[in-house]
Amino acid sequence: LSVLGNHDWGGRYFNAGWDQQIAYTWASERWVMPAPYFSVHVDYPDQDFSADIFMIDSNVFDAEDLDKDSEHNICGALHTPTTASCTAAGGPPSLAECKSWFQYFWELQKKWLEQKLGESKATWQIINTHFPCGHESGWYAHLHKHHGLDLLVTGHRHEQELWAHSGRLGGLTCIVTGGGGGITSEWSPEMKNSQYGFFDIAISKDKMFLELINHEGQTLTSATIHPKH
């Protein structure tokens, strides 16, 4: 289950063929990303529980004014062709409208997600998005408190982080699983050994157990969460 990151859009422009990644869903038996945002319901009938997983696009947080941060701005003018348009794929229609398009798209998703969470009857509610733990903290805390959100899965930062029952997120647990960024990392692995690795997540009806395992196979930290509903 995949979501687009800022570099999938283009990193410093917005027309990098991101729609081809979406289309690849229908050419692969493993790749699942039928849209920039979508949800999947998973049943575990033998274990008597279920999960609703919501994929959302949070790249609005790298969509700045035309002249801002040209090397990390999806809507930056320096690297984007003046004739760039993703209208045919349902994306930003022009460079001038890029930032406002991402802002509109984010608000549209937020309304959709709150409605879907309110309708969810699953045991677990999980969000998967690109931008890391800490963005839109107040909104995610609201989703945890009022809509039963159990886990937030993120990336973007090139390291592994476990925010267990975070006070900043109103008690919500969030992970950053950014260890797949090639040779890039936030710190040297010799200085901070959580740069590369993965999360092992065991889910059952009554609890979810998360382990942060680094590139040397060491379990650095873990957390147990229980369904909010």
Image (cartoon, rainbow, N blue to C red):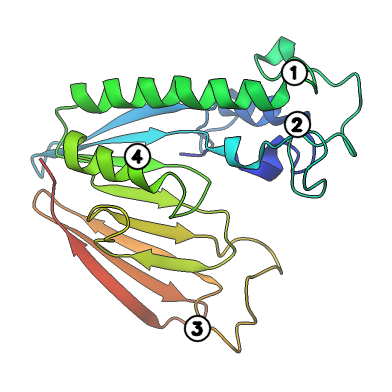
Mark 3 nearby-residue class (10 Å; few <14, some 14–19, many ≥20): few
Mark 2 and mark 4 lie on one chain; the one further toward the N terminus is 2
In three-dimensional space, the C-alpha distance between marks 4 and 3, rounded to whole angstroms, equals 35 Å
Residue 101 in the image: state x and y as whole percent.
64, 21
Residue 121 in the image: state x and y as whole percent.
14, 28
Residue 172 in the image: state x and y as whole percent.
26, 53
Mark 2 nearby-residue class (10 Å; few <14, some 14–19, many ≥20): many
As drawn, the label of residue 14 is: 2
In three-dimensional space, the C-alpha distance between marks 2 and 4, rounded to whole angstroms, equals 26 Å
Assign a secondary structure to mark 3.
Answer: loop
Q: Mark 1 = which residue?
A: 86
Which residue occupies 55% across, 72% down? 196
In three-dimensional space, the C-alpha distance between marks 4 and 1, rounded to whole angstroms, equals 29 Å
Which residue occupies 39% across, 64% down? 199
In the drawing, does residue 103 fall left or right of residue 94?
A: left
Mark 2 and mark 1 residues within 8 Å of each other at the beta carbon? yes
Q: Mark 4 = which residue?
A: 139
Mark 2 and mark 1 lie on one chain; the one further toward the N terminus is 2
Mark 3 and mark 1 lie on one chain; the one further toward the N terminus is 1
In the drawing, does residue 208 fall left or right of residue 72?
A: left
Which residue occupies 30% across, 26% down? 114
Can you see residue 162? yes
Mark 4 and mark 1 lie on one chain; the one further toward the N terminus is 1
In three-dimensional space, the C-alpha distance between marks 3 and 2, rounded to whole angstroms, equals 36 Å
Q: Quadrant of residue 78?
A: top right
